[in-house]
Image: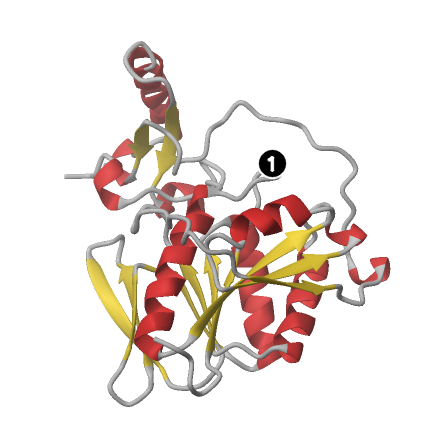
Amino acid sequence: MASSEGKRVLAVLERDEGGGVLPASLELIRAGSGLAEEMGAELSVAVLGHGIQGLVEEMAQFSAEVFAVDHPLLSDFQVELSTEALHQLCRASPPDVILFTHSLEALEVAPRLACRLGGQLVTDCVKLEPGPGGELLCDKPIYGDNAVATFVLRSRPAVLTLRSKVLEPAEPKGEKGRVVAFEPALDRSVAKTEVLERIAGEEVGLDKAEAIVAGGRGIRVKEGLGLLEELIQVLRDRFSTVELGASRPLVDMGWLPPPGSSASPERGRAPSST
């Protein structure tokens, strides 16, 4: 459906360490494409970084419009710089809906951007659809995924993060979209931190793990995590990637660090106290 009122859905893609896009970003494009069609809007995607022309050309196969937000200070992720760059982009080309992946980086940027733009924010969405009165309906799992709440957003822009593994990744459209170069005016003084060194870890994100061993309230004592580690070692004889996950209570108690990603409910079960 063509955009008759200039409506726009903007999907902010997240890059992986190799310079490509995360699989969750392709899921984001599919979600944005479906929502844009229902809204009678146009889907645009934004790629942030430096020296990203090759990636931008690749992403032009997935969307009618790609913003190449290119600046030397965007080579490494810095929350303040990324937020400022997107703020400038959204002021120059205002979107109605802004979509992010549900990653740690996105959860740093999305709330800041929503605040600057005076928009509404909902995180960890699993379903998006326009309402009959022009509002946006967003489904979000709550109470440990035991219930789903529907948020009704009536003001714009709506800033949303989407849970991964909910949709299949988007496929190339077969025709190349237009590429729009956008160079934000950034200053290093905006950043409050500096990347000194990157150390590659051995862990695999929960969204990429073949199997997940997750702990919940049933662990009862911190020493019980050792049993999960033993189970992980056993399962590694069968699965190529097995990672340790946790429900929120264990993270809140400081027994495990917050994971860099989340898993869909059907992919992980945490021991309970029952």
The residue depicted at 53 percent of the width and 22 percent of the height is 202
Rendered location of residue 7, percent (x, y): 46, 81
User: Foreground: 208 or 15?
Assistant: 15
Q: Is residue 118 above or below residue 243?
A: below
In the image: residue 7, left or right of residue 229: right
Rendered location of residue 11, percent (x, y): 49, 62
The residue depicted at 47 percent of the width and 79 percent of the height is 96
Rendered location of residue 231, percent (x, y): 30, 17
- Kind of residue at disc 1: Glu
Q: Is residue 181 above or below residue 137?
A: above
Tell me the quarter of the image containing the N terminus: bottom left
Dot 1: few (<14), some (14–19), or many (≥20) neighbours within 10 Å?
Answer: few
Q: Is residue 214 above or below residue 229?
A: below
Visible in this render: residue 253? no
The residue depicted at 67 percent of the width and 49 percent of the height is 53
Tell me the quarter of the image containing the C terminus: top left
- Return the residue found at the far front: 175
Secondary element at image label 1: loop
Residue ID for mark 1: 17
Report the coloring of the rendering: secondary structure
Q: Tell me the quarter of the picture where residue 151 sits.
A: bottom left
Count the marks: 1
Rendered location of residue 256, percent (x, y): 45, 36
Q: Is residue 241 above or below residue 131?
A: above
User: Foreground: 179 or 190?
Assistant: 179
Visible in this render: residue 195? yes
User: Foreground: 249 or 165?
Assistant: 165
- Return the residue found at the far left: 274
Q: Tell me the quarter of the picture where residue 94 sits.
A: bottom right
